[in-house]
Image: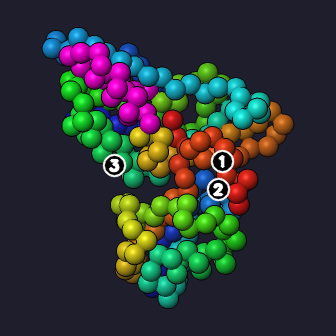
Amino acid sequence: MNYQLLYFASLADRAGCAGETVQSDATGLSALYDELRVRHGFAMDPARLRVAVNGQIVDWSHALADGDEVVFLPPVSGG
Amino acid sequence: MKRFALATTAIDVDAEKRRLDDSRAGACVLFEGWVRNHNEGRSVIRLDYQAYAPLAESEGEAIMAEAMARFDLRAALAVHRTGSLAIGDLAVWIGVSADHRNAAFEACRWIIDEIKLRVPIWKNEHYADGESGWLHPDNTPVESDS
């Protein structure tokens, strides 16, 4: 399946890009994040991340569909 | 009516404040978050704010709707800057109007706390020594735990 990944803050720095299309056999978010950790060397523990799919915050148990936009959100620091 | 906005240019505080007008309101509380020149003992020269805009806007709207439901308010508005900001710039503006001051003070405090916790906006501090770093909500650096 193809996923549209967007990266922000420290994850964007580590990936070296703001986003990319990733082809993956992963159908779950944990498996997809594990692949990205290998691909980009993300060090952040998934327990510290929230996840958004197609612009909505979802649980890590959310099932992915082909073409989904997926964003792993580092802890925020606005304000 | 939209209550939360991201702004790529300077926030028009006077225009925002006029949107709080309500002849039933006896209290107005405003909060301004400014870019300060230091954090965690380091000298800061400027900030960049990055946002995941579609989710920041929907999450921001949800916070403002929750504030309207939780507190006895007439109006509540918030604007958050994105992009590159200098020391002293206005980074976030919050305004509430209410019939009485208690609800106005409490709601304003609650809104800024929720924004800092939930809205997908990230602060990158640029330091006087040439380094920069992304921050966690408690203003500690991301790199220390990665």
**Amino acid at pointer 3:** Ser
Marks 3 and 2 sit apart, C-alpha to C-alpha, by 23 Å
Q: Position of residue A47 (x, y in %)?
A: 54, 65
**Amino acid at pointer 2:** Ser
- Residue position for label 1: B134
Badge 2: chain ID: A
Q: Considering depth in this image, is B129 or A1 the residue closer to the camera?
A: B129
Residue B115 lies in what quarter of the image?
top left
Name the quadrant of the N terminus of chain A. bottom left
Q: Which residues are magenta?
A: B93-113
Q: What residue sits 35% from the left and 21% below the top?
A: B105
Q: Is residue A12 magenta?
A: no
- Residue position for label 2: A10
Tell whether B12 sits left or right of B17: right
SS at mark 3?
A: helix
Q: What residue sits 38% from the left and 33% below the top?
A: B110
**Amino acid at pointer 1:** Trp
Q: Residue furthest right?
A: B129
Q: Residues within 10 Å of mark 1 (few under 14, many from 20)?
A: many
